[in-house]
Amino acid sequence: MKILVIEDEEGLRESIEEYFSEAGNVCETASGYSAAITKINLYRYDCIVLDITLPGGNGMDVLKSLKENNHPDGVLIISAKNSLDDRLDGLNLGADDYLVKPFHLSELKARVTAIIRRKTFNGSNLLIFNEITIDLLAKEVKVGKMALKLTRKEYALLLYFIANKGKVVSKNAIAEHLWGDGIDMANNFDFIYSHIKNIRKKLMEAGCNDYIQAAYGMGYKFTDQ
Amino acid sequence: MKLLTKYNRVNLATAIIVLLVTGIIYYQAISWILTNQKDKDLKVEEQEVFEYVNLNHHLPQTFESNDQQITFTEVQANSIHRQFIDTTYFRKWNNDSRHKHRHKRIGEYEPGRGLVTAVTAGGKYYKVLIIESKVETEDLIQIIFVITIGVILLLLIVLLITNRLILSRLWQPFYSIMKELRLFNITDSKEIQKVDTSIDEFKELDRAVLAMAAKAKHDYKDLKTFTENAAHELLTPIAVINSKLDTLIQTENFNERQSKILNDLYSAVSRLNRLNQSLLLLVKIENRLHKDEEKIDMKALTEEQLVQFEEIFQDKGLKLSYSLDDKEIFANRNLAEILLSNLLGNAIRHNYSGGEITLSLTGEQLVIGNTGDDKPLAGEKIFTRFHKSSGSEGSGLGLTISRQICENFNFSLSYRFQQPFHIFTVKFK
């Protein structure tokens, strides 16, 4: 997939670029308004990660320009402003999603992947990872031919892992993804461990390989290598 | 003490003292004038006696007129010193007088004014005593005195009433300003109303109050803007730290010590982030920026939240008992969610493993109780910013935010301790 990151904060831009650059992916960056406009007029991207506050202009104008030219690129707005108005403005202008800073890279990846998946929707909307098949519309998971019974959170967790396959996902990121901000009472993440244990058990009982690896007590990695 | 009361008290005291003094002076003056009058009468009578003696060389017949008695007594020559005296006058009643029958006496003593003088008649020296009854004079004084007192009392009452009326009307602007001040809320967008008055002092007071309120609001707004900006500016560095940490853990092979440090960093950053978000949220609630209100089914929302917390309940082994009635409120959904999740989160965080949580939703209120510390919390203090129980991992803003949300919704949030439960009650109004 081909991604454009429009973000003026160098540290953040580099991190996103690094996280998204992997085999088969192209990740380009733009640090300002004019650079962004130039790039979106020249190339097409599967998804554009767009910061709202940019030097030399407003991210919303980049979005407007995209829509005026009928470019089909997916757009994910990342903004420090957690206001509903901004969110609604962005979504009304045709953005696909809105993520508030600060965020975990794994969360960003999951959202971008979801946008691209929706954009390249080819009728079946099946997500396939080796022997695991996920029907995103029916929210059904199969290992080979065998259907799995996953809880809502286990399903979300599996999707999250697959979107971030090959990456170490921190326990904080998992907790925030599954429970939102309500998670702040738990400084021990034992319940995440029991979730992982359950989902791993269900997958393996269905004859699936064990793809979930614990990563030095900090998080987990979903990988087939 | 009210100003009016104080004023009246002083006023009344001075009025009574002044009136008493003038009353006494008045009485003395009248009785002096009337006594003088009597003395003149007595002198005329004396003159008549002298003229009679000069002419006839013997004493006149003593007779008793209505209000006058004259007695002659023979005394040693030149022993009499002429003087006016206060004495008594004996009035004989007529035979058919009602008094005589009633009192079985022949008369009564009345106050009198007398003149002691001397006359020489027929070579003999006589003491002459002329007495006039003062009873009518006294009556006159009394009547005048009573009328005067009456007038004074009337004046006093009228003064008191007009004072009361005028003063309370006069002070009306003051009370209006006071009322405005009492209603003044620094977080409120409502301005203090200008009070309409023609009195300079109150105009000045009103101006001062308006200026002070405007300044307080302005300063408060500045402070709030500062908080908001500061929190906002912090977001980007936090985002960078967060993303760098996410990147860092992708690099392979950490030993146990390093991963412990990374874990600590993660939780510190996420705490910093939550704190920052809470500050921003608080500013936003105070600014009443959450306009979009909708009908919310509290029962469904509470159930949703309970599902959200399900794993954590299980993890901590908490026993949850709840009863939910149907209840609809009209409010911002996001804030309602935050309120519920804050209260539930607290009930979990401050609980011990294997503890209990009770939850009841009725048409009037939402009550959340949890076991925890054996001691009651610090009352109202727990709702202040950054108040934290020792060992709490929270931001110290959760209850402040909850209270603000309740105020925003016109609900009330209160705390009480009922062994062994810490109970938070949201009353819908």
Image (cartoon, coloured by chain):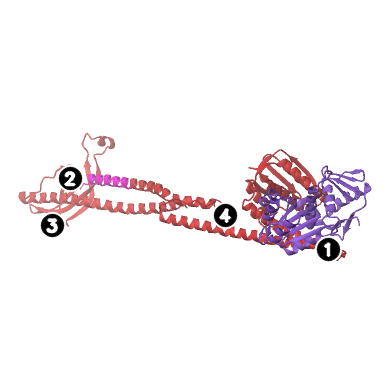
Chain colours: A purple, B red
Kind of residue at disc 1: Lys
Q: Earlier in the sequence, mark 4 or mark 3?
A: 3
Q: What element carries label 4?
A: loop
User: Which residue corresponds to mark 3?
Assistant: B77
User: Which residue corresponds to mark 2?
Assistant: B68
Are circles 2 and 3 on residues that touch, CB within 8 Å?
A: no
Q: What element carries label 1?
A: helix
Please report the bounds of the magenta region as a residue range.
B133-152
Q: Distance between the residues labelled 4 and 3?
A: 102 Å
Q: What element carries label 2?
A: strand
User: Which residue corresponds to mark 4?
Assistant: B186
Relative to A207, B50 lies left or right: left
Q: What element carries label 3?
A: loop
Give the residue drawn at x 92%, y 53%: A210
User: Which residue corresponds to mark 1?
Assistant: B260
Q: Distance between the residues labelled 1 and 2?
A: 128 Å
Q: How far apart are marks 4 and 1 (CA)?
A: 46 Å
Kind of residue at disc 2: Gln
For this rendering, which residue is in front, B94 or B337? B337
Chain containing mark 4? B
Give the residue drawn at x 47%, y 56%: B207
Q: Residue B344 in the image: x percent, y percent?
A: 74, 49
Q: How far apart are marks 1 and 3 (CA)?
A: 139 Å
Q: Earlier in the sequence, mark 2 or mark 3?
A: 2
